[in-house]
Each structure stands twice: as structure tokens, then as C-alpha cells.
Image (spheres, rainbow, N blue to C red):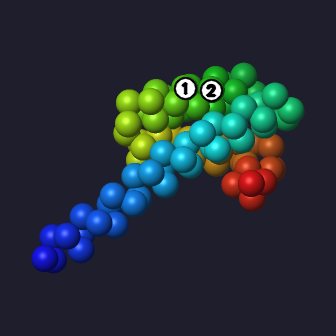
Amino acid sequence: MRHYLLVIPLLFATPVFAMHCPNDMAKIDQILANDPPPDDETLRRVTELRTEGQEAHEAGDHQEAVDKLGEALEILKAETGRDAKAEE
């Protein structure tokens, strides 16, 4: 019985992560279109993380996708001064 108590929350967590990914990708795309980082290396890194996040999302590895996309958003926040997570 206790095993079910551990598994049930995981069943609900995966769809939440899956829905979170497209929102983060859209935020990254919006920032890159409207206020890209001035540094080419930072732009390259954010673009790379966004791509890796999308690939992880499409492969069903939503925790990896959330991690990669979150890292990209944090870099953008540091570079642009915009809190991308608060712009939901």
C-alpha cells in the first residue's frame, strides 16, 4: 500500500513537467526575438540549452528538459535583467 502512495504523485508530476516545457521554450524564444543577449557566446549557450531542452522534452525526459530550459532562462535573466519566470 505504501508503494502506491509513492507512485501516485509521480503519475501526476510527469504531465506537469511535460506542460511546463513548451511554456519555457516559448519564453526563451520571445526573449531571444525581442531582447537577445549582446554577447555571441551567451546567445550560443542559451540557444544550445533551448535545443537540448526541446530534444529532452520530445524524448519524454521532462526533468532533463525542465533543467536545461531553466538554465537557459537563468542565463537570460542574468544577461538581460528580465525575470523570464515572472513573465508568465
The reply to whether callout 1 and callout 2 are in contact (CB within 8 Å) is yes
Q: Specify the quadrant that holds the C terminus.
A: bottom right
Q: Specify the quadrant that holds the N terminus.
A: bottom left
Q: Give the structural element (helix, strand or loop) at label 1.
A: helix
Q: Mark 1 belongs to which amino acid?
A: Thr
Q: Residue at x 29, y 66 (%)?
A: 8
Q: Quadrant of residue 12?
A: bottom left
Q: Mark 2 belongs to which amino acid?
A: Thr
| Circle 1 crowding by C-alpha within 10 Å: few under 14, some 14–19, many from 20 | some
Vertically, is 55 above or below 67? above
Q: Compare residues 41 and 3 and report the one nearer the observer.
A: 3
Q: CA distance from mark 1 to mark 2?
A: 6 Å
Residue named by callout 1: 51
Q: Nearer the viewer, mark 1 or mark 2?
A: 1
Residue named by callout 2: 47
Residue farthest to the bottom, as pictured: 2
Q: Compare residues 14 and 43 and report the one nearer the observer.
A: 14
Q: Give the structural element (helix, strand or loop) at label 2.
A: helix
Residue farthest to the right, as pictured: 34
Q: Quadrant of residue 4?
A: bottom left
